[in-house]
Amino acid sequence: MIGFGQTAEDYFAKALDYQKERDYKYQIDNYTKCLQIDHNYIEAYDNRGRAYYKLKNYEAAIADYTSAIRLNPNDAKVYNNRGIAYSMLENYKLAIDDFTRSIKIDPNYLIPLEGRGVGSNPYNNRGRVYYYLGSYENAISDFTRSIRIEPNNANTYRDRGVAKEDAGLNYCGDYKSACTLGNKNCCEWYNDQCR
């Protein structure tokens, strides 16, 4: 129920207050109230989609991301977010399509990941999908592009190293780089397999 005199911005602000506390159901409730008042509030669709995603309701997340895309078809972030949700449902074709669209809109788009000092980007996300599909050459290419955007992300070096190993290519340099950047598993892998 919408409160008397409450604006869409009021509900949006309430939802944001609970983002740090990770109360996703409360966020969804307030974003829904926001959207009942203003059906064109793009950020409310995107943020509610992320809250649904966190609750593993990927179909609802995709629906919200799709609504945001209808309102603004040139938002790299929302295409990337929807691609991640599609990949969680193993709908890899649609995931690749969305990551590719995100890259076309903004080839250098980077999603900061809170508290980790690294981010993620559509190249990295698309590379993982290619890896799951066994398309190692495409995966390695995308991981390489991702590293150009964010050269200090140990996880991308790890991912590229795994793809190279599975493809029968030299992977030791990637495991060493990931180790140097703080990935302890890659330190073990490098010491066990490459020395």
Image (cartoon, grey):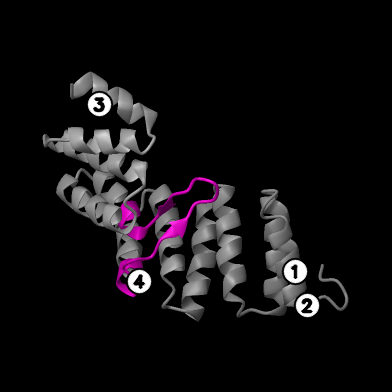
Q: Which residue is mark 2?
A: 7
User: On residue 106, which mark appears?
Assistant: 4
- Label ID, residue 11: 1
As measured in the structure, the alpha-carbon distance from the residue carrying label 1 to the one carrying label 4 is 30 Å
Q: CA distance from mark 2 to mark 3?
A: 56 Å
Residue 146 vertical position relative to residue 189 in the rendered view, above or below: below
Q: Position of residue 178 (x, y in %)?
A: 31, 37
Instruction: Name the kind of residue labelled 4 in the image.
Output: Asp
Q: Within the image, what quadrant is residue 74 found in? A: bottom left
Segment colored magenta? 102-126
Disc 4 element: loop
**Residue 32 position by quadrant:** bottom right
Residue 100 falls left or right of residue 3: left
Residue on which disc 3 sits: 190
Q: CA distance from mark 4 to mark 3?
A: 34 Å
Residue 156 image offset from top left, x and y in percent: 32, 45
Q: Is residue 31 magenta?
A: no
Tell me if label 1 and label 2 are in contact, CB under 8 Å: yes
Residue drawn at 23 percent across, 52 percent down:
144
The amino acid type of the residue labelled 1 equals Tyr
Does label 2 or label 3 sit earlier along the sequence?
2
Q: Earlier in the sequence, mark 1 or mark 4?
A: 1
Q: Is 118 situated left or right of 29 in this image? A: left
Q: Nearer the viewer, residue 133 or 167?
A: 167
